[in-house]
Image (tube, grey):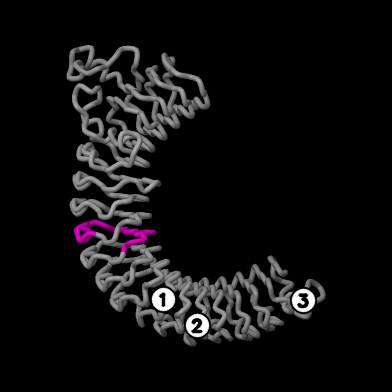
Amino acid sequence: MNLSDFPILKQLCGLMELPCLEELVLNNMPSLERISGGPFPSLVKLAMYSLPRLRDVWIVTKTTMSDREEGGSFSNCKYHMGQEFRVGNCLSYLIVLSCPKLKVKSYLPLSLQLLGVYGISERLLESPRRCEGYSLPFIFSHLKMLNLCQITEFGYGPGSGRRWNLLQHMTTLESLKIDDNFFQLTELPESLGSLHSLQKLTINSCNMIRLPQSMGHLTSLHSLDICNCSAIHKLSECLGELCSLQQLIIQSCDSLSSLPQSMGHLTSIQELRIEECPALHQLPECLGEFSSLRTLHVRDLPNIKSLPQSLQRLTSLQDLIIYDCDELQELPECLGDPRSLQKLEISGLPRLACLPEFMCRLTSLKQLWIKNCLGLTSLPMGMKSLSSLENLEVKWCSGIKSLPEGIFGLPSLQTLEISEFPEIKSLPEGIKCLTSLQILRIDNCPGIKTLPKGIKSLTALKQLWIHGCSDLVRSCEKGKGADWHLISHIPDLLIY
């Protein structure tokens, strides 16, 4: 049930019992000050959006009410009959968005799995006093997921994070997302380190200059994502204590100038992404210690001039992307075990003059993309050794004047795309050897005027796309062009 857009409604009281109601959304009621009703024994999801004047919500369960009636531990709290919002023991999702004055005085069921709070006061994360009407911290003891976004100090100013002592009671929390959006959050609490069950931590758009030292205690953490934290200059050495970490993403941290050598202790890490960090001038040699690393993405690091030679020790590496590193002049002579790498993308490296010959030993490589490398003048001659290659894209490398014959000896190649080669004059006759080729795309190669005759023998070819090659387009004109008889058997033709 969705109740939305009641601009003058001040009280939403006495909502009738709806025994089958599973989802309730209250949205955009700018005058609403109070809600009550129920019971809703089947309610699974409760969401409150854009209720700027709503202050106190007493969320209670049948168990809580019985406890009060029997003179239990909650009987001395400021708790008023008729103001309760009564739920059952099915409530799993509670989401609060843009309710800056709200205090959720809750005796929530242990069924609660996800709590999402957006644009409210950080007082919600303080450990409550017994008589304030809040439930005791054990209501969060079964919480699995917590999403915090735009948490403010007392609902108005920036949140400091110092009041978040309630975190220490969330002993089963597995996923925590902190997303500030307006870069107001200046620090995270040391109590973060008490989340011993935490497996995934996302920190986004915060204005803190460091991470809490206690993060080293998160020994169950599998995934750490630090994004858009522009004030962080360096990461703490405690990062190396995250012994279970499998995924590390560092993205858009404008001031980050170095990475800790302790990262070498992250021997369980399988995925590392370092992206959009303009102040970073080098990557640590300890990256070569990541014996379990399968995915490495290095992207938008404009001041990196070289990659660590230790990367040759990445024996499990399967997916490597090096993208938009303007100062990078060369690649290491070897990158991991050539029998492991399956995907390689090299893009946006204008100073790269040549590709290392190790590329020709990548016998398990299935996907190779080479894009926007204006300094390249040729591709490796031994590419015919890439026996497993299925997808090859070479684009925007205007310095390359011809394609090596080795490209046309790839028995597994299914997709070939070449784009923006003004100097290439023709495709070799060896194209007839690409017996597995299904897709061929030629884009903006004006020097190519005709197709090789061997293309007629490519019986597996399903799609041919030719664009920006005026002479070739005329040669392939349906029923008229000199090369039409070579391509008429292809089901999907796009020539313009």
In this view, the residue in front, 384 or 54, is 54
Find the distance from the CA under tag 2 to the CA under tag 1.
14 Å
Residue picked out by circle 1: 327
In this rendering, position of residue 159 left or right of residue 420: left
Of the image marks 2 and 1, the number of the one nearer the N terminus: 1
Looking at the rendered structure, the number of numbered marks drawn on it comes to 3
The answer to whether residue 252 is visible is yes
Quarter holding residue 146: top left
Q: Amino acid at mark 2?
A: Leu
In this view, the residue in front, 125 or 344, is 125
Mark nearest the camera among 3 and 2 is 2
Q: Is residue 439 above or below residue 378?
A: above
Q: Is residue 258 above or below residue 333?
A: above
Q: Residue at x 20, y 37 (%)?
A: 169
Q: Which mark is residue 474?
A: 3
Find the distance from the CA under tag 1 to the CA under tag 3.
41 Å
In this rendering, position of residue 122 left or right of residue 451: left
Mark nearest the camera among 1 and 3 is 1
Q: Is residue 453 above or below residue 4?
A: below
